[in-house]
């Protein structure tokens, strides 16, 4: 009986400890969500501004939130790459190279998208565009259908 109580107590403690570990997932799901979140604007307003020809970076910059937007986009990309590594689709080395490339592009990014280049690994290569060689068809991991920014932005 004593051992059962001890076992139950330890199991309950382990469960509580496991549940108290924070999940390290991106706060936002994509560029529109991130832009809306960091600017405090409804996503409908962000989409309207996008349709007028602005990039998400320009919109964030207009609200004085470009650094926050870049950070949010980096977090999203890191989350996607971690998932790809965990699924065995890419190596940790490939993910690290992709994150390094994102950081380098973000450092020179003014939000206009004028210096955006593909990243490979399905993070911007897309069907013959960009600079990544990836794996599979040569257009990024799995054909470049990963997290590709369609507005030519540099984050």
Image: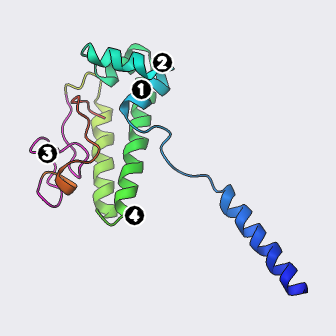
Residue 133 highlighted magenta (yes or no): yes
Please report contact status of discs 3 and 4: CB closer than 8 Å, yes or no: no
Alpha-carbon distance for marks 1 and 3? 26 Å
Report the residue marked by disc 1.
35
Name the image quarter holding residue 12.
bottom right
* Residue bounds of the magenta highlight: 115-138
Residue under the image location 38 percent in, 19 percent down: 46
- Residue 23's place in the image compared with 87, above or below, is above
Q: Which of the two labelled residues, at mark 1 and mark 2, occupies the earlier sequence position?
A: 1
Q: Which of the two labelled residues, at mark 2 and mark 4, occupies the earlier sequence position?
A: 2
Residue under the image location 75 percent in, 73 percent down: 11
The percent coordinates of residue 65 (x first, y second) are 44, 21
Alpha-carbon distance for marks 1 and 2? 8 Å
Nearest-to-viewer mark from 1 and 3: 1
Q: Which of the two labelled residues, at mark 3 and mark 4, occupies the earlier sequence position?
A: 4
Residue under the image location 48 percent in, 26 percent down: 38
Report the residue marked by disc 4.
86
Alpha-carbon distance for marks 3 and 4? 24 Å
Nearest-to-viewer mark from 3 and 4: 4
The percent coordinates of residue 86 (x first, y second) are 39, 63
Q: Which of the two labelled residues, at mark 1 and mark 3, occupies the earlier sequence position?
A: 1
Q: Which of 29 and 109 is in front in this view?
A: 29
Report the residue marked by disc 3.
131
Report the residue marked by disc 2.
41
């Amino acid at each position: 009986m004593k051992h059962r109580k001890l076992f139950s107590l330890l199991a309950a403690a382990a469960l509580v400890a496991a549940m108290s570990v924070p999940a390290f997932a991106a706060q936002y799901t994509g560029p529109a969500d991130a832009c809306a979140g960091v600017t405090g604007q409804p996503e409908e307003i962000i989409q309207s501004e996008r349709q007028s020809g602005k990039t998400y970076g320009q919109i964030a910059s207009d609200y004085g939130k470009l650094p926050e937007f870049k950070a949010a986009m980096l977090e999203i990309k890191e989350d996607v790459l971690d998932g790809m590594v965990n699924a065995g689709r890419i190596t940790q080395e490939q993910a690290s190279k992709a994150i390094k490339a994102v950081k380098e592009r973000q450092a020179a990014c003014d939000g206009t998208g004028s210096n955006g280049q593909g990243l490979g690994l399905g993070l911007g290569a897309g069907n013959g565009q960009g600079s990544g060689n990836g794996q599979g068809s040569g257009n990024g991991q799995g054909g470049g259908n990963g997290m590709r920014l369609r507005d030519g932005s540099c984050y």
